Amino acid sequence: MIEIHYTEEFERRYQELPPPVQRKAERRERLFRENPFHPALKTEKLQPLKREYWSFRIDRSYRIIFRFEGTDKVLFVTCGHHHWIYRYLLAH
């Protein structure tokens, strides 16, 4: 099973999500722990590829951005609406 760690950024952004999206995120996180590439998550590597950021879907509008920190360890970097997420990544 995947071990997940959270940045302060992720924890702050997660608290700002609407409650229904938080509940969906919790269900998706459980699925992610079992299989980070489960088809329902639509996990994808983000550009530029050298930065090693990945995302998976909470739902059609919201994403979680993460990095693999080893074979069974992951760092959740941030979360939010997909339009905001991609602007965030360009800035960092």
Image (cartoon, rainbow, N blue to C red):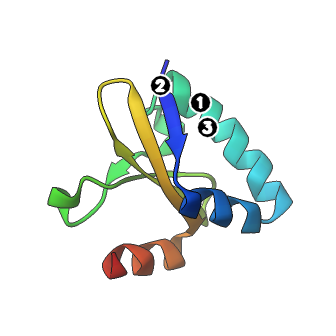
Residue corresponding to mark 2:
2
Q: In the structure shown, which secondary structural element does the residue marked by tag 1 occupy?
A: helix
Sequence-wise, the earlier of marks 1 and 2 is 2
Mark 3: amino acid:
Glu
Mark 2: amino acid:
Ile
In the image, what residue occupies the spot 63% across and 55% down?
A: 59
Which quarter of the figure is the C terminus placed in?
bottom left
View extreme (left): residue: 50
Q: Are marks 1 and 3 in contact (CB under 8 Å)?
A: yes
Rounded to the nearest angstrom, the CA distance separating label 1 from label 2 is 10 Å
Residue 10 point in image, percent of width and height? 57, 58
Residue 49 point in image, percent of width and height? 18, 58
Q: In the structure shown, which secondary structural element does the residue marked by tag 3 occupy?
A: helix
Observer-nearest residue: 66 or 86?
66
Label 2 crowd (10 A; few <14 / some 14-19 / many >=20):
some
Label 3 crowd (10 A; few <14 / some 14-19 / many >=20):
some
Residue 17 is labelled as none
In the image, what residue occupies the spot 51% across and 78% down?
A: 83
Query: Of discs 1 and 2, which sits in the foreground?
Result: 2
Rounded to the nearest angstrom, the CA distance separating label 2 from label 3 is 10 Å
Residue 43 point in image, percent of width and height? 41, 45
Vertical placement of 29 versus 45: above or below?
Answer: above
Residue corresponding to mark 3:
29
